[in-house]
Image (cartoon, grey):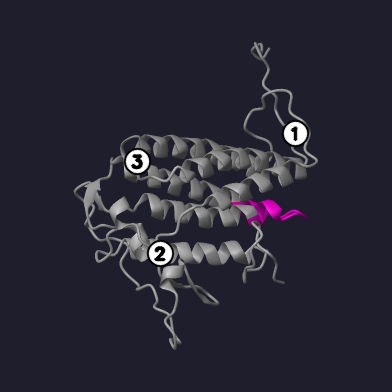
Amino acid sequence: SQSANPYGLSTTQPRTGAYATNSARRQTAVYQAERSSPFGGISRTLGWVETSDTTRCRSRACARPPGSEKARMAKRTRIYTRTGDDGTTGLYSGARVRKTDARVEAYGTVDELSSAIGVALAMLRDSPSTDDRVEVWLAWTQDKLFDLGAELATPSESKRSVPAVTDGDVAALERAIDESEEGLPLLDHFIHAGGSTPGAMLHLARTICRRAERRVTALREHESSVDPVTLRYLNRLGDALFVWARRLSAERGAAESPWRKDAPPPG
Protein backbone atom coordinates (compact mmCIF):
# COMPACT_ATOMS: atom_id res chain seq x y z
CA SER A 1 0.00 0.00 0.00
CA GLN A 2 1.09 3.55 -0.63
CA SER A 3 1.20 6.16 2.08
CA ALA A 4 2.28 9.71 2.80
CA ASN A 5 5.86 9.94 3.90
CA PRO A 6 6.72 11.13 7.43
CA TYR A 7 7.05 14.80 6.61
CA GLY A 8 3.73 15.22 4.87
CA LEU A 9 4.56 15.07 1.14
CA SER A 10 3.32 12.36 -1.20
CA THR A 11 5.68 9.55 -2.08
CA THR A 12 5.62 6.50 -4.31
CA GLN A 13 7.45 4.43 -1.72
CA PRO A 14 5.51 2.15 0.66
CA ARG A 15 5.68 2.69 4.39
CA THR A 16 7.06 -0.79 4.88
CA GLY A 17 10.69 -1.86 4.92
CA ALA A 18 10.84 -1.62 1.12
CA TYR A 19 11.34 2.13 1.51
CA ALA A 20 14.56 1.60 3.41
CA THR A 21 15.63 -1.30 1.19
CA ASN A 22 15.38 0.72 -2.02
CA SER A 23 17.04 3.66 -0.28
CA ALA A 24 19.97 1.46 0.66
CA ARG A 25 20.32 0.23 -2.92
CA ARG A 26 20.34 3.80 -4.22
CA GLN A 27 22.98 4.79 -1.67
CA THR A 28 25.14 1.79 -2.57
CA ALA A 29 25.00 2.73 -6.25
CA VAL A 30 25.98 6.32 -5.51
CA TYR A 31 28.85 5.30 -3.25
CA GLN A 32 30.15 2.93 -5.92
CA ALA A 33 30.03 5.74 -8.45
CA GLU A 34 31.78 8.05 -5.98
CA ARG A 35 34.80 5.76 -5.93
CA SER A 36 35.18 5.93 -9.71
CA SER A 37 38.14 8.03 -10.82
CA PRO A 38 36.07 10.22 -13.22
CA PHE A 39 34.13 11.48 -10.20
CA GLY A 40 35.62 14.05 -7.90
CA GLY A 41 33.40 13.55 -4.86
CA ILE A 42 30.11 12.41 -3.48
CA SER A 43 28.02 15.24 -4.92
CA ARG A 44 29.17 14.58 -8.49
CA THR A 45 27.20 11.34 -8.57
CA LEU A 46 23.83 12.88 -7.83
CA GLY A 47 21.82 11.83 -10.83
CA TRP A 48 19.79 8.89 -11.97
CA VAL A 49 20.60 5.65 -10.20
CA GLU A 50 19.16 2.20 -10.70
CA THR A 51 16.99 0.48 -8.08
CA SER A 52 15.20 -2.85 -8.10
CA ASP A 53 11.87 -1.56 -9.32
CA THR A 54 12.26 1.98 -10.58
CA THR A 55 14.70 4.68 -11.57
CA ARG A 56 14.64 7.75 -9.41
CA CYS A 57 16.33 11.12 -9.50
CA ARG A 58 18.25 12.48 -6.53
CA SER A 59 17.56 16.12 -7.39
CA ARG A 60 15.25 18.25 -9.52
CA ALA A 61 18.17 19.33 -11.66
CA CYS A 62 18.50 15.87 -13.15
CA ALA A 63 14.89 15.75 -14.33
CA ARG A 64 14.39 14.02 -17.67
CA PRO A 65 14.35 16.31 -20.69
CA PRO A 66 11.10 16.45 -22.69
CA GLY A 67 10.67 13.35 -24.81
CA SER A 68 13.27 11.35 -22.93
CA GLU A 69 12.14 7.82 -22.24
CA LYS A 70 15.16 6.44 -20.43
CA ALA A 71 17.17 7.72 -17.53
CA ARG A 72 20.92 7.89 -17.25
CA MET A 73 22.16 5.07 -15.03
CA ALA A 74 25.04 5.07 -12.61
CA LYS A 75 27.94 3.23 -14.22
CA ARG A 76 29.31 0.07 -12.66
CA THR A 77 32.84 0.69 -11.46
CA ARG A 78 35.57 -0.87 -9.38
CA ILE A 79 35.42 -0.20 -5.65
CA TYR A 80 39.14 0.54 -5.54
CA THR A 81 40.69 3.40 -7.53
CA ARG A 82 44.05 3.95 -5.79
CA THR A 83 43.54 7.72 -6.10
CA GLY A 84 43.32 8.09 -2.32
CA ASP A 85 46.49 6.18 -1.55
CA ASP A 86 48.33 9.45 -0.92
CA GLY A 87 45.93 10.46 1.84
CA THR A 88 43.83 12.83 -0.28
CA THR A 89 40.28 12.73 -1.58
CA GLY A 90 38.37 14.65 -4.25
CA LEU A 91 35.63 17.24 -3.82
CA TYR A 92 32.95 18.22 -6.33
CA SER A 93 35.05 21.10 -7.62
CA GLY A 94 37.77 18.66 -8.64
CA ALA A 95 40.09 19.94 -5.93
CA ARG A 96 41.82 17.34 -3.82
CA VAL A 97 42.15 17.80 -0.08
CA ARG A 98 43.71 15.87 2.75
CA LYS A 99 41.47 13.25 4.31
CA THR A 100 41.99 15.04 7.61
CA ASP A 101 40.43 18.20 6.15
CA ALA A 102 37.61 19.68 8.23
CA ARG A 103 35.16 19.22 5.35
CA VAL A 104 36.01 15.53 5.03
CA GLU A 105 35.76 15.09 8.80
CA ALA A 106 32.28 16.65 8.68
CA TYR A 107 30.71 14.62 5.89
CA GLY A 108 32.59 11.49 6.98
CA THR A 109 30.99 11.72 10.42
CA VAL A 110 27.58 12.22 8.81
CA ASP A 111 28.23 9.01 6.86
CA GLU A 112 29.15 7.25 10.10
CA LEU A 113 25.89 8.47 11.62
CA SER A 114 23.87 7.10 8.72
CA SER A 115 25.65 3.75 9.08
CA ALA A 116 24.71 3.54 12.77
CA ILE A 117 21.09 4.27 11.87
CA GLY A 118 21.32 1.53 9.25
CA VAL A 119 22.32 -0.95 11.96
CA ALA A 120 19.29 0.11 14.02
CA LEU A 121 17.05 -0.37 10.99
CA ALA A 122 18.42 -3.88 10.47
CA MET A 123 17.69 -4.66 14.11
CA LEU A 124 14.13 -3.39 13.71
CA ARG A 125 13.53 -5.66 10.74
CA ASP A 126 14.72 -8.60 12.83
CA SER A 127 12.30 -7.70 15.64
CA PRO A 128 9.34 -5.86 14.07
CA SER A 129 6.68 -4.16 16.18
CA THR A 130 3.09 -3.20 15.51
CA ASP A 131 4.12 0.44 15.07
CA ASP A 132 6.54 1.10 12.22
CA ARG A 133 6.60 4.89 12.48
CA VAL A 134 10.10 5.05 13.94
CA GLU A 135 11.36 2.75 11.17
CA VAL A 136 9.81 5.02 8.54
CA TRP A 137 11.34 8.11 10.11
CA LEU A 138 14.76 6.47 10.27
CA ALA A 139 14.61 5.52 6.58
CA TRP A 140 13.73 9.13 5.73
CA THR A 141 16.56 10.34 7.96
CA GLN A 142 19.10 8.27 6.01
CA ASP A 143 17.97 9.96 2.79
CA LYS A 144 18.32 13.41 4.37
CA LEU A 145 21.75 12.57 5.76
CA PHE A 146 22.85 11.56 2.27
CA ASP A 147 21.67 14.97 1.04
CA LEU A 148 23.49 16.63 3.92
CA GLY A 149 26.69 14.73 3.18
CA ALA A 150 26.52 15.77 -0.46
CA GLU A 151 26.13 19.41 0.53
CA LEU A 152 29.05 19.26 2.95
CA ALA A 153 31.23 17.60 0.31
CA THR A 154 30.60 20.44 -2.14
CA PRO A 155 32.56 23.71 -1.86
CA SER A 156 30.48 26.86 -2.13
CA GLU A 157 31.79 27.76 -5.59
CA SER A 158 30.53 24.45 -6.96
CA LYS A 159 27.06 24.43 -5.39
CA ARG A 160 24.48 24.34 -8.15
CA SER A 161 21.74 21.78 -7.80
CA VAL A 162 23.16 19.83 -4.89
CA PRO A 163 20.36 18.60 -2.59
CA ALA A 164 20.37 20.04 0.90
CA VAL A 165 18.43 19.89 4.13
CA THR A 166 15.96 22.70 4.69
CA ASP A 167 14.09 24.39 7.50
CA GLY A 168 11.11 22.29 6.42
CA ASP A 169 13.14 19.19 7.31
CA VAL A 170 13.94 20.71 10.71
CA ALA A 171 10.23 21.33 11.27
CA ALA A 172 9.50 17.75 10.22
CA LEU A 173 11.87 16.45 12.89
CA GLU A 174 10.17 18.63 15.49
CA ARG A 175 6.81 17.11 14.51
CA ALA A 176 8.35 13.64 14.74
CA ILE A 177 9.68 14.36 18.24
CA ASP A 178 6.29 15.60 19.45
CA GLU A 179 4.56 12.59 17.89
CA SER A 180 7.01 10.06 19.33
CA GLU A 181 6.96 11.53 22.84
CA GLU A 182 3.21 10.92 23.20
CA GLY A 183 2.62 8.21 25.77
CA LEU A 184 6.22 8.03 26.99
CA PRO A 185 6.86 8.40 30.73
CA LEU A 186 7.92 11.88 31.73
CA LEU A 187 11.60 12.18 32.58
CA ASP A 188 12.58 13.77 35.89
CA HIS A 189 16.04 12.20 35.95
CA PHE A 190 18.91 11.33 33.62
CA ILE A 191 18.91 7.90 32.01
CA HIS A 192 21.75 5.76 30.70
CA ALA A 193 21.98 4.64 27.10
CA GLY A 194 20.53 1.14 26.87
CA GLY A 195 17.08 -0.38 26.96
CA SER A 196 16.19 -2.54 23.98
CA THR A 197 18.85 -3.53 21.45
CA PRO A 198 17.60 -1.20 18.66
CA GLY A 199 17.01 1.53 21.25
CA ALA A 200 20.58 1.22 22.51
CA MET A 201 21.81 1.45 18.93
CA LEU A 202 19.91 4.71 18.47
CA HIS A 203 21.53 6.05 21.64
CA LEU A 204 24.89 5.31 20.01
CA ALA A 205 23.68 7.02 16.81
CA ARG A 206 22.70 10.01 18.95
CA THR A 207 26.26 10.40 20.24
CA ILE A 208 27.61 10.18 16.68
CA CYS A 209 25.07 12.82 15.67
CA ARG A 210 26.39 15.15 18.36
CA ARG A 211 29.92 14.56 17.10
CA ALA A 212 28.77 15.35 13.54
CA GLU A 213 27.26 18.55 14.87
CA ARG A 214 30.62 19.47 16.44
CA ARG A 215 32.47 18.67 13.19
CA VAL A 216 30.11 20.84 11.13
CA THR A 217 30.46 23.64 13.70
CA ALA A 218 34.25 23.45 13.36
CA LEU A 219 33.96 23.52 9.55
CA ARG A 220 31.67 26.54 9.65
CA GLU A 221 34.18 28.47 11.76
CA HIS A 222 36.40 28.85 8.68
CA GLU A 223 33.87 28.07 5.92
CA SER A 224 31.14 30.67 6.28
CA SER A 225 29.34 29.24 3.24
CA VAL A 226 28.15 26.24 5.27
CA ASP A 227 24.40 26.75 5.60
CA PRO A 228 23.43 27.18 9.27
CA VAL A 229 20.36 25.02 8.65
CA THR A 230 22.67 22.00 8.62
CA LEU A 231 23.47 22.66 12.28
CA ARG A 232 19.81 23.14 13.14
CA TYR A 233 18.99 19.84 11.43
CA LEU A 234 21.71 17.88 13.24
CA ASN A 235 20.80 19.48 16.55
CA ARG A 236 17.15 18.48 16.16
CA LEU A 237 18.11 15.03 14.89
CA GLY A 238 20.10 14.37 18.07
CA ASP A 239 16.95 15.11 20.08
CA ALA A 240 14.86 12.92 17.78
CA LEU A 241 17.23 9.97 18.11
CA PHE A 242 16.98 10.21 21.90
CA VAL A 243 13.18 10.14 21.78
CA TRP A 244 13.09 7.37 19.17
CA ALA A 245 15.45 5.29 21.33
CA ARG A 246 13.06 5.66 24.27
CA ARG A 247 10.07 4.85 22.06
CA LEU A 248 11.62 1.62 20.77
CA SER A 249 12.57 0.50 24.27
CA ALA A 250 9.10 1.27 25.60
CA GLU A 251 7.44 -0.68 22.77
CA ARG A 252 9.59 -3.70 23.63
CA GLY A 253 9.04 -3.50 27.37
CA ALA A 254 12.69 -2.70 28.10
CA ALA A 255 13.16 -0.71 31.30
CA GLU A 256 15.17 2.48 31.28
CA SER A 257 18.20 2.64 33.56
CA PRO A 258 18.28 5.87 35.61
CA TRP A 259 21.48 7.56 36.63
CA ARG A 260 22.20 6.87 40.31
CA LYS A 261 24.13 9.71 41.84
CA ASP A 262 26.97 8.50 44.08
CA ALA A 263 26.10 4.90 43.27
CA PRO A 264 27.92 2.43 45.56
CA PRO A 265 30.04 -0.29 43.98
CA PRO A 266 28.55 -3.80 43.68
CA GLY A 267 28.76 -5.77 46.91
Name the one closer to the observer, 63 or 22.
Answer: 63
Q: Reply yes or no: does residue 132 show up in magenta.
A: yes
Q: Sequence order check: which comes first, mark 1 or mark 2?
A: 2
Q: Mark 1 and mark 2: span between their CA atoms? A: 40 Å
User: Closer to the observer: label 1 or label 3?
Assistant: 3
The residue at 63%/38% (across/down) is: 242
Q: Is residue 267 above or below residue 210?
A: above
The span shown in magenta is 121-136
Q: Sequence order check: which comes first, mark 1 or mark 3?
A: 3
Q: Are marks 1 and 3 in contact (CB under 8 Å)?
A: no
* Mark carried by residue 224: 3
Q: Position of residue 133 (x, y in %)?
A: 70, 54
Q: Is residue 147 above or below residue 209?
A: below
Total residue callouts? 3
Q: Is residue 187 left or right of residue 116?
A: right
Q: Mark 1 and mark 3: span between their CA atoms? A: 44 Å
- Mark 2, other Cα within 10 Å: few <14 / some 14–19 / many ≥20: many
Residue lying furthest right in this view?
183
Judged from the image, the secondary structure of the residue bearing numbered disc 3 is loop
Q: Mark 2 and mark 3: span between their CA atoms? A: 28 Å
Name the residue type under label 1. Ala
* Mark carried by residue 193: none
* Mark carried by residue 255: 1
Judged from the image, the secondary structure of the residue bearing numbered disc 2 is helix
- Residue at label 2? 30
